[in-house]
Amino acid sequence: MALLKHTPVEIKERKALTINPAKTCQPIGAMYAALGIHGCLPHSHGSQGCCAYHRSTLTRHYKEPISAATSSFTEGASVFGGHANLVQAIDNIFTVYDPEVIAVHTTCLSETIGDDLKQIFDKATKSGKVPEGKTCLGAATPSYVGSHVTGFSNMVKSMAQLAEPSGHKSHKVNVIPGWVEPADMAEIKRIAEMVGVDITLFPDTDGVLNAPLTGEYKMFPDGGVTVAQLKKTGDAIGTLALGEWCSADAARWLDAKCKVPCTVLDMPFGLAATDRFIDVLRTVAGVSVPESVAFERGQLVDMISDMHQYFYGKRVAIWGDPDQLISMCEFLVSLDMQPVYVVTGTPGKKFEARIKEICADKPFEVKVKAKGDMFLMHQWIKNEPVDLLIGNTYGKYIARDEDIPLLRWGFPILDRQGHQYFPTVGYKGGLRLLEKILTLLLDRKDRDDPETTFELVL
Amino acid sequence: MAKTKKVVQLMPTDIKEELLKKYPPKVARKRAKQIMINEATEAEAPPEILANVRTIPGIITMRGCTYAGCKGVIMGPTRDILNITHGPIGCGFYSWLTRRNQTDPGPDGENYMPYCFSTDMQDQDIIFGGEKKLAAAIQEAYDIFHPKGICVFATCPVGLIGDDIHAVSKKMKEKFGDCNVFAFSCEGYKGVSQSAGHHIANNQVFSHLVGENEEAKEGKYKINLLGEYNIGGDGFEIDRIFKKCGITNISTFSGNSSYDQFASAQHADLDCVMCHRSINYVADMLETKYGIPWIKVNFIGAESTAKSLRKIAEYFGDKELIDRVEEVIAEEMPEVKAMAEQVRPHTEGKTAMLFVGGSRAHHYQDLFAEMGMKTLSAGYEFAHRDDYEGRHVIPELKPDADSRNIEEITVEADEKLYNPRKTPEELKALEDAGYEFKHYAGLNEQMDKGTLVIDDLNQYEADKLVELLKPDIFCAGIKEKFSIQKLGVPMKQLHSYDSGGPYAGFKGAINFYKEIDRLVTSKVWSYMKAPWQESPELTATFVWE
Ligand code: SF4
Ligand code: SF4
């Protein structure tokens, strides 16, 4: 019997009820972004339940300790404001855990009360609760606006706002990678190094959320962008923001306030988006791209040409975060695959337009919804099936019910490993994506082919 | 890590001092009352623990919230009630399938557990109120699914803006006629921990559901199992054993449960309480209203399972049942004993720490004891003093602002349905023979003298404890898992079982022995250092032969 047995084929319009969301709330994104700062303890300003949920979900996805503190609101704080709780928390955190930075984000509770983080930080600083040389930063992340992606973006913007332009330009380029895996952040740094561009990557969870097992526990692992580096982002020659939803706000702020010109690009998933990333990177920095990069690119093109027959015409349903979906859809289309259903829970009409544009004049019709949910997507699949699912772990129920292979990609992945360690950005990441897609499709074919036509050779 | 085992014996007082050292004075004073040296070896510390008090802001706590206790723990495992979270998307999302409550939808096939329903409140709902959207969402859920029941859960902002979720639910219930709709004011900030949410959930289930199905239930020995959530299939194993013994489980609160189970709970003749914290007051209410006595049981550990079965049989007092229970125990035990013997050489004398829930840190000590393992330190995430010190302290507990927040419902004997299952003389005879009704001794009693009992342990203290005492295994939840393991100590999740289980009953004990054997003998913990890190000084070069 089916797991989602109550999902009817007939689609009725829903105005009020979200079923099986393709998004979650802002603070978790802010918490993840904050972990990409060196020596940072994220802090959730609200009741402790939100913090527990965000830590649990991030832990389940990254399989790493996620330390974060909370203001542990009482009912009183919920009515009269959480000033006292946060000041006390700041004091306790610096005394007990001694982080370099506390990155506070609000929750729907403290937002509804209207707590002003700046004011509270001032109070904490004036009363001597913030030790010399330590930093408090904050982001407003009301969970009834946007999604986890919005929260990520808001925290990244707060990181940019630490910039203190000195008036002297450095030779550095800021790269804002958006919500990608620690492995992806490492890969972006590797690519920049190959191209020969000195970048400041922020946030940077490489080294924080993929730390080794050594018998020692470091609450603040060695990775992450430092506050000193963030302060200097105002002197950079330019900023590359990867992803309109995740990264553009921070980049535009640096552009407007510190005169650091920015380019907003797609996240470098797949061939074309990686091409554009590297092309802009070399232009901004004024360097030429070495042969080694072209070599990796050629390998990806090679795999596409060798395996094209297996990709061609395959119908895909895909859900997740807007920036990731845009690049992935472009990649799928470039392989002559057909992303027929595309759903994000994050609101944004621009998203729908962009996906339609990517799929325009192609031999299939795309159904796309921003602020959609997985229930609707499943109903579409029931009406007309697909060959492949791409998305987070919650898709495994649909995969089993409808007997469709699932490529786990996005957030959260609760039931598989590897995403922390193996990148999917860049050309190498593209190869990995193709390998995974091929394995899924071919395993499926090997399972389903009749004995007479069962093939040994590809 | 075995190599680095501490040789020096630390005194419990030293450990306590070490844990408190880093705190600001005010925090240290409060934590000092929550860290108890069992059976007080120091004169100034009374054997009393501060529990169920607010977590200190800024301290990285293991706790969750009221909503998590209400929607996640209590209502989560009930398959044919459609649960709508009224609030922004997060809370609903995080409680979507994350607790490993297994369920068997049975022949009717109704099961909404794989679904997540939310009103996904937006800023205009926060500004103008979300009641209209909630009513529309309930209507849409009804139109698409036609469930027997719909439950509504409030998240933090809902309480603040003052949506009357109970009025909306009542209105919709009346409108539908064939669907029971009721709501829970379980905003996250309401209580100190999940425990407040358990209470809110249980009260509403008791008021809106229990007693609804008047149709008599078949069965000679009818019980309810309270406070068992079927994590990893624990409830399946317990039910298997009940069935084998001829005991009928009318309802489990709330693992693998259904609407009808709750609605029929009043037909049972005995209530058996597993997790004392999550539900002891329901047992009291069932007794007052329907006349069903209750006992504390524990199905974690093979010996405890046998003991609990005997206790149930003794209550009913029928030779047939008493004999059958003995037969079942005799049948099941050899396999359990054989496995215990097999693992003992690896587990004997090893040490454990347990910091989970509001009963598990106690229940699991039985299993460890069966393997010859000692519990060095334990405590709860969301217990009250009675879970530590026993039920006799309940009258001493003074209500504070937080406990006053939670509605206490007053229950009276039901005019029609109250039916004392035993006469006062029968009860007395049992008690005189040493039978304990309404009794729970608490965790402290079972723990060795000088062990540390710690309430609301936090990340800093957990890491310190592990560093100081180097246990062979540490048990807690997902948030603690990886920081402990980074220290080179295996960590077993006892909320979600690391995808293992069942661990209850006889078969569960076998599973657990094997699992702990695997963990404490795993080679991985010896790989922490590379060969060149063991002796970093280069004293000679390697000469190729
Ligand atoms: S939606 Fe709001 S209350 Fe719920 S987890 Fe997110 S921040 Fe917390
Ligand atoms: S203490 Fe444990 S068994 Fe009781 S409600 Fe909790 S997680 Fe559950």
Image (cartoon, rainbow, N blue to C red):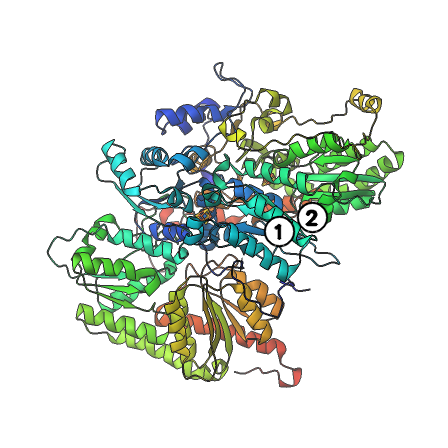
N-terminal of the two: label 1 or label 2?
1
Q: Is residue B358 above or below residue A233?
A: above
The kind of residue tagged 2 is: Ser
Question: Label 2 neighbourhood size at 10 Å, few (<14), some (14-19), many (20+)?
Answer: many
Q: Position of residue B254 (x, y in %)?
A: 66, 44
Q: Nearer the viewer, residue A435 or A345?
A: A345
In the rendered structure, the answer to whether residue B208 lies left or right of residue A29 reads right
The kind of residue tagged 1 is: Met
Task: Name the quarter where the N terminus of chain A is drawn.
Answer: bottom right
Q: Secondary structure at mark 2?
A: loop
Looking at the image, which residue is at 65% across and 82% down? A450
Residue B102 seen: no
**Residue occupied by mark 1:** B172
Q: Nearer the viewer, residue A274 or B216?
A: B216
Question: Residue B238's quadrant in the figure?
Answer: top right
**Residue occupied by mark 2:** B257
In the rendered structure, the answer to whether residue A394 lies left or right of residue A77 reads right
Q: Position of residue A7 (x, y in %)?
A: 62, 65
In the rendered structure, the answer to whether residue A180 lies left or right of residue A100 reads right
Q: Position of residue B65 (x, y in %)?
A: 50, 40
